[in-house]
Image (cartoon, grey):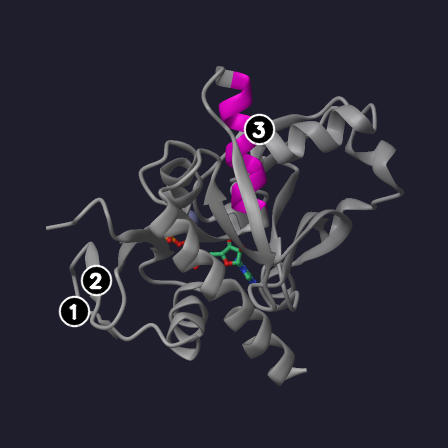
Amino acid sequence: MTDKNRLRIAVQKKGRLSNESIKLLKAIGVKLSIRDRLLIAHSTNLPIDLLLVRDDDIPGLVMDGIADLGFIGENELEEKMLERQAAGEPAEYKTLKRLEYGGCRLSIAVPNEFNYQGLESLQNTKIATTYPYLLKRFLNENNINAQPVMLTGSVEVAPRAGIAEAICDLVSTGATLEANGLEEATEIFVSKAVLIQQAKELSQEKQELINTLIPRINGVMQAKE
Ligand code: ATP
Ligand code: ZN
């Protein structure tokens, strides 16, 4: 059960942003009882509920006002915003805080044997990606006529499978690219985790609670520096 008077925070259930986001909440004094497999977790000391979901769902939950706050990677947030704008759906949110984890970049990569000579080399290629809107924006801005091919997984094997000549995927160390015989051609978006809030005004109680949480996040982040 959820109570609409409790602050609802969307957090990735499992994955690269999950542990750090929950660790941050705990560090600012939000006591949580998280049980496996449940969509909802309650705070035991504050009027806060967590919605534990896939990261892809978090921007939409916040933009639709289902969640009050959300921890999300800027890559996913920006992609969803572009997708929703294209569909004429609500895409508003407020960024409360850029965080210090979840750092990565969205890059175009090509097979080692591609002979990449700069962006022009990408003309008339197919580029496999999970981020077609961010990719399309980059291609348009650079006058490159290439075709994004949407894949939700296994993007890095697309060139070997003959599905695309290049890929556009998230990179942090580059080890996955290297393991798949790919090299980074160009970076198109740099990302970190952010804390966002829904655009609509919240109740005074909820807003006051948020106003006490933000300085605590600042404190935790400063202590780490
Ligand atoms: P979900 O099941 O929640 O959809 P996922 O497979 O889409 O999970 P993860 O791999 O956990 O997602 O990545 C979540 C986010 O972590 C990314 O969108 C990005 O913001 C961030 N991230 C940081 N480093 C990396 C990396 N090396 N590769 C992919 N994502 C990264
Ligand atoms: Zn995801």
Type of the residue with mark 2: Ala
Residue at x 40%, y 70% (from the top left corner)? 25
Asked if residue 40 is positioned above or below residue 197 in the image, the reply reads below
Type of the residue with mark 3: Leu
Q: Is residue 129 visible?
A: no
Q: Residue furthest right?
A: 117
Residue indicated by mark 3:
82
Residue at x 55%, y 68% (from the top left corner)? 215
Q: Position of residue 46 (x, y in %)?
A: 27, 67
Magenta-colored segment: predominant secondary structure: helix
Residue at x 35%, y 42% (from the top left corner)? 203
The residue nearer to you, when weighing 148 against 43, is: 43
Residue 20, by quadrant, is bottom left
Is residue 93 left or right of 148 when viewed as pictured?
Answer: left
Magenta segment: 75-86
Residue 129, by quadrant, is top right
Circle 3: is it few (<14), some (14-19), or many (20+) Cα within 10 Å? some
The label shown at residue 224 is none
Q: Nearer the viewer, mark 2 or mark 1?
A: 2
Residue indicated by mark 1:
35
